[in-house]
């Protein structure tokens, strides 16, 4: 009995986190056009979602931005983590690298918009990709550094002593060792970019808004069943992405174990 009582706060927390998500998923199958009144089961809002030009345009822009952000963040974030962990250890550089991840979104958004205006950079998907990469790089670097800190540096030293170049050592020793962290960082950068609103709102073109901006514009007049259907599909995509990342990470670890 005491164990059940001690676990009660945990279950309350789970309920607080997941019941709203469950409500959105259930109401996406509602036959009524009301987002709050259940009248029966229906799948009609999913085909209707595909016919909504604004939502599909926002989804296309968001996927372009998220994929571009992930590529840039993974490449530069991994290199940044490697530099800070192996070559240039510095508390000042550590703080500078982590600053975009802890900086308030509104400050980052205003600063980026001011910079784009100063240099005359045209707003559009590219400007949002660069803006999202600012904090994406910081998150990827933080995740990869944790893995790098547990990787035995003597393996890299032995590779170089045997005549391998720094690039060969990275591809053959370092990268396989940090691959799970790189995958986790990629997933994190993709997810953060997918639903980021504030920075995108300031740096996107009004003609090519991202999906969160489109949703914000529509929910000001009430939550539509199409939005619930869209949220359910995005939840499914995120769930599948997490499972694939975990499976890939376990496969990578098992292959390393079998080789050793």
Image (tube, helix red, strand yellow):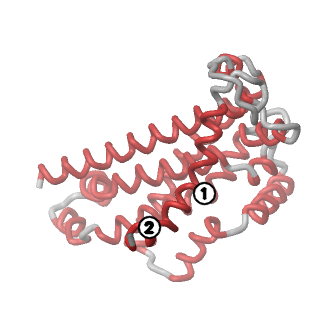
Q: Nearer the viewer, mark 2 or mark 1?
A: 2
Please tell me how many numbered marks the rendered image carries.
Answer: 2
Image quadrant in which you'd find residue 38? top right
Q: Is residue 38 left or right of residue 237?
A: right
Q: Position of residue 179 (x, y in %)?
A: 34, 52
User: Which disc, if any, is residue 71?
Assistant: none
The local secondary structure at tag 1 comes to helix
> Which quarter of the rendered picture does the C terminus lie within?
bottom left
Q: Is residue 61 left or right of residue 155?
A: right
Image quadrant in which you'd find residue 215? top right
The residue that label 1 is drawn on is 16
Q: Residue at x 53, y 76 (%)?
A: 94
The earlier-in-sequence mark between 2 and 1 is 2
Q: Residue at x 59, y 36 (%)?
A: 234
Which residue is at the far front? Answer: 1
Give the camera-side residue of 136 and 9. 9
The residue that label 2 is drawn on is 7
Give the camera-side residue of 111 and 237. 237
Give the camera-side residue of 93 and 182. 182
Q: Residues within 10 Å of mark 2 (few under 14, many from 20)?
A: few
Q: Position of residue 199 (x, y in %)?
A: 74, 53
């Amino acid at each position: 009995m005491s164990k059940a009582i001690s676990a009660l706060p945990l279950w309350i927390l789970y309920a607080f986190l997941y019941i709203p998500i469950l409500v959105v998923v259930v109401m996406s199958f509602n036959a009524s056009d009301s987002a709050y009144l259940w009248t029966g089961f229906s799948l009609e809002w999913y085909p209707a979602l595909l016919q909504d030009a604004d939502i599909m345009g926002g989804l296309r822009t968001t996927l372009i931005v998220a994929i571009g952000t992930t590529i840039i963040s993974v490449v530069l974030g991994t290199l940044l983590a490697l530099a800070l962990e192996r070559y240039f250890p510095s508390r000042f550089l550590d703080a500078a690298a982590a600053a975009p991840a802890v900086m308030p979104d509104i400050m980052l958004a205003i600063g980026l918009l001011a910079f784009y205006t100063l240099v005359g950079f045209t707003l559009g998907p590219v400007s949002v990709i660069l803006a999202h990469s600012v904090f994406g790089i910081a998150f990827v670097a933080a995740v990869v550094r944790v893995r790098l800190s547990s990787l035995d540096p003597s393996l890299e030293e032995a590779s170089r002593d045997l005549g391998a170049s720094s690039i060969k050592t990275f591809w053959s020793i370092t990268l396989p060792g940090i691959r799970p962290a790189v995958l986790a960082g990629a997933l994190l950068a993709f997810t953060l970019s997918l639903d980021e609103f504030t920075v995108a709102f300031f740096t996107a073109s009004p003609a090519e808004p991202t999906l969160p901006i489109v949703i914000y514009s529509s929910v000001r007049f009430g939550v539509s069943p199409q939005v619930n259907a869209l949220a359910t599909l995005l939840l499914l995509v995120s769930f599948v992405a997490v499972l694939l990342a975990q499976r890939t990470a376990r496969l990578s670890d098992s292959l390393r174990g079998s080789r050793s």
